[in-house]
Image (cartoon, rainbow, N blue to C red):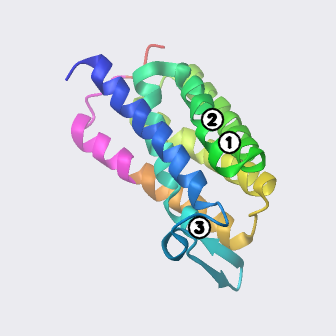
Amino acid sequence: MSRFARAGIAVGAYMAFIVLVNWLFIPDNLIEGVTQWSTNTWMGTLYLANVIVGFVFVLRDYAQREIGHKVLLATLLAGIPVYLLAGPGLAIASLTAFALSETVDWAVYSFTKRPLQNRIILSALLSVPVDTLAFQHLAGYLTPAAFVTEVLSKAIGVAIVWYLLKLRVGNAETPATA
């Protein structure tokens, strides 16, 4: 597969998942029984989107690997359908959170010279809580249950990708040069 095709798939999947996850947060969307699944726990309300949002970070890592920091442009472009579907409040919360966490990722990917699998873990440890707190606070969904579940979801997604990458490259990957 060509580099252009890999980049298109990675960036397209990342952008589509941004739209999907934000759509799952819309209170009155069309498939209420499926997408508006929520439950009240002793720590607050938990939404389906809190459970599956972790894959956005995995897809972002792959998109960033293919197109570098131009991934911010992909994030911004994905904000257009989010704005149209969910309105300005959710779109601003989402884009602000992604911009903050992408800035953290940028720093990790730019200034550390570690192998990719190590940068994935380090960037997740730093950017996931920043993104989660910013989005949930700005969107009005911040509860302890939602925060903990979303951070765990993202951590599980990142751990899976780290493990698959580790299997693929083993210890052969050399530290990054840029």
Q: Looking at the picture, how far across and down is residue 22, in whole percent?
A: 60, 52
Give the residue displayed 41% in from the left and 34% down from the top.
12
Tell me the distance, in whole angstroms, between the alpha carbons under discs 1 and 2: 5 Å
Tell me the distance, in whole angstroms, between the alpha carbons under discs 3 and 1: 25 Å
State left or right for residue 147 relative to residue 71.
right
Q: Looking at the picture, how far across and down is residue 74, in whole percent?
A: 54, 28
Give the residue displayed 51% in from the left and 77% down from the top.
33
* Residue behind mark 1: 83
Mark 2: which amino acid? Ile
Prevalent SS, magenta region:
helix
Tell me the distance, in whole angstroms, between the alpha carbons under discs 2 and 3: 27 Å
State left or right for residue 93 relative to residue 56.
right
Instruction: Choose the circle earlier in sequence order: 2 or 3.
Output: 2
Front residue of this view, candidates 27 and 133:
27
Nearer the viewer's eye, disc 2 or disc 3?
Answer: 2
* Residue behind mark 2: 80
| Residue closest to the far left | 1
Instruction: Choose the circle earlier in sequence order: 3 or 1.
Output: 1
Give the SS element for disc 2: helix
* Residue behind mark 3: 149
